[in-house]
Image (spheres, rainbow, N blue to C red):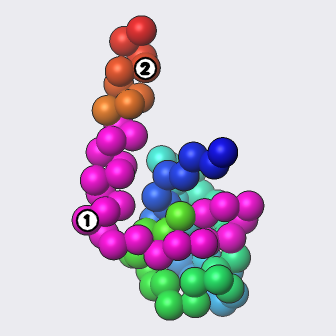
């Protein structure tokens, strides 16, 4: 099972992109999603962006993760 968190694209130097994930920066390959642009959100698996996300969907998902983290810290 893979749990994916939206990552925000912060720079592109094809075929590579730099993404931000919760404050950490990662270099990924964007060959599978060549239409992404700086500021877009993607799902990353095994170093590749595999899905381009709608900004609203990404923000909703990130909010759910924040709620999950907050709840996990309370226990």
Q: Counting residues from the N terminus, which is met first, the one under dot 1 or under dot 2?
A: 1
Q: Is residue 62 magenta?
A: yes
Local SS, label 1: helix
Identity of the residue drawn at 60% across and 72% down = 50
Image position of 29 (left or right of 4): right
Which one is in front, 43 or 11? 43
Checking the image for residue 72, the label placed there is 2
Image position of 32 (left or right of 8): right
Local SS, label 2: helix
Q: Within 10 Å of the Cα at label 1, are there few (<14), some (14-19), or many (20+) other Cα atoms?
A: few
Q: Position of residue 6 (x, y in %)?
A: 46, 58
Checking the image for residue 47, the label placed there is none
Q: Within 10 Å of the Cα at label 2, are there few (<14), some (14-19), or many (20+) other Cα atoms?
A: few
Q: Position of residue 29 (x, y in %)?
A: 70, 76
Residue 37 visible in the picture:
yes
The residue lying furthest to the right in this view is: 46
The residue lying furthest to the front in this view is: 1
Q: Quadrant of the N terminus?
A: top right
The residue lying furthest to the top in this view is: 75
Write down the quadrant of residue 12 in the picture.
Answer: bottom right
User: Disc 1 marks which residue?
Assistant: 56
Q: Quadrant of the C terminus?
A: top left
Identity of the residue drawn at 44% across and 80% down = 38
Residue 10 visible in the picture:
no
Labels in figure, total? 2
Above or below, 35 relative to 60: below
Q: CA distance from mark 1 to mark 2?
A: 24 Å
Q: Position of residue 23 (x, y in %)?
A: 49, 49
Q: Which residues are magenta?
A: 44-66
């Amino acid at each position: 099972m893979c749990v994916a968190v939206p990552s925000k694209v912060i720079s592109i130097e094809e075929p590579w992109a730099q993404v931000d994930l919760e404050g950490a920066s990662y270099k990924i390959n964007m060959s599978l999603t060549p239409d992404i642009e700086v500021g877009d959100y993607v799902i990353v698996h095994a170093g590749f962006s595999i899905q381009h996300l709608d900004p609203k969907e990404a923000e909703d998902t990130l909010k759910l993760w924040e709620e999950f983290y907050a709840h996990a810290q309370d226990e």
